[in-house]
Amino acid sequence: FLNRSLGGLFGVFLAFFGAASLSFAWPKLKGGFGAAVVAGKVDDLRNQVFLADGAMQPVFIASAQSWIVPYQGNPDDSQFGANATVGGAGANVGLMALWQKCVHLGCRVPDCVSSQGFECPCHGSKYNFHGEYQDGPAPRNMDRFVVSVADNGDFVIDTGSVVQTARAPVKTALYPQGPSCV
Ligand code: FES
């Protein structure tokens, strides 16, 4: 009787373990980090990022672990990686999504309004507001996600598609523009 009970328990354990492993390994197809995340309407986000006085304010999207920042260049430029930017109507001002995870050892990187960049509190890596490497032990620019704008105006961050780029030899955003935060 004991042998059968133990065998049954072991079978139940294996079934649970198998199901948990499968659900962990299975890619998320919709919603949540690891999949496509709708950050909001692209026009609303632009209004939040580009302030009336000409300054910029990164917008944090927790569900995508992303900072939404300006992209002020030609959408066909490749320095930020394929499909990592979206263009803007007319003014050629668009957006991109930076992964908040520091590319050095993975700390969360906050924005620094006074310097107009991102500064890691762990070991001092610094990036301008395009996520380009400026200083510290980080081996490359901040990572970006593939982004797109849906027909209904949703700004979509594909957190399953990480775009990595090498330290930019020529920076596309001025940094620092004021005192650092770390
Ligand atoms: Fe950011 Fe080390 S984790 S500098």
Image: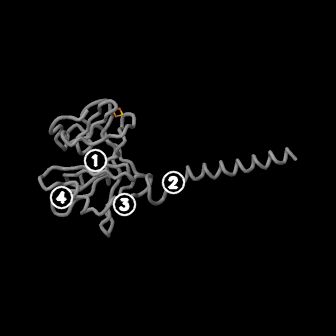
Along the polypeptide, which appears first: circle 1 or circle 4? 1
Q: Say which of marks 4 and 3 sits in front.
A: 3
Q: Quadrant of the C terminus?
A: top left
Q: Say which of marks 2 and 3 sits in front.
A: 3
Q: CA distance from mark 4 to mark 3?
A: 22 Å
Q: CA distance from mark 1 to mark 2?
A: 25 Å
Question: Identity of the amino acid at label 2?
Answer: Pro
- For ligand 1, which image quadrant applies? top left
Along the polypeptide, which appears first: circle 4 or circle 2? 2
Identify the residue position indicated by label 4 in the image. Answer: 92
Question: Identity of the amino acid at label 3?
Answer: Val
Identify the residue position indicated by label 3 in the image. Answer: 38
Location of residue 83 by image quarter: bottom left
Mark 2 crowd level (few <14, some 14–19, many ≥20, 10 Å Cα): few
For this orientation, the residue located farthest to the left is 53
Q: Going by the image, does 75 lie left or right of 35?
A: left
Considering only vertical position in the picture, is 100 above or below 46?
A: above
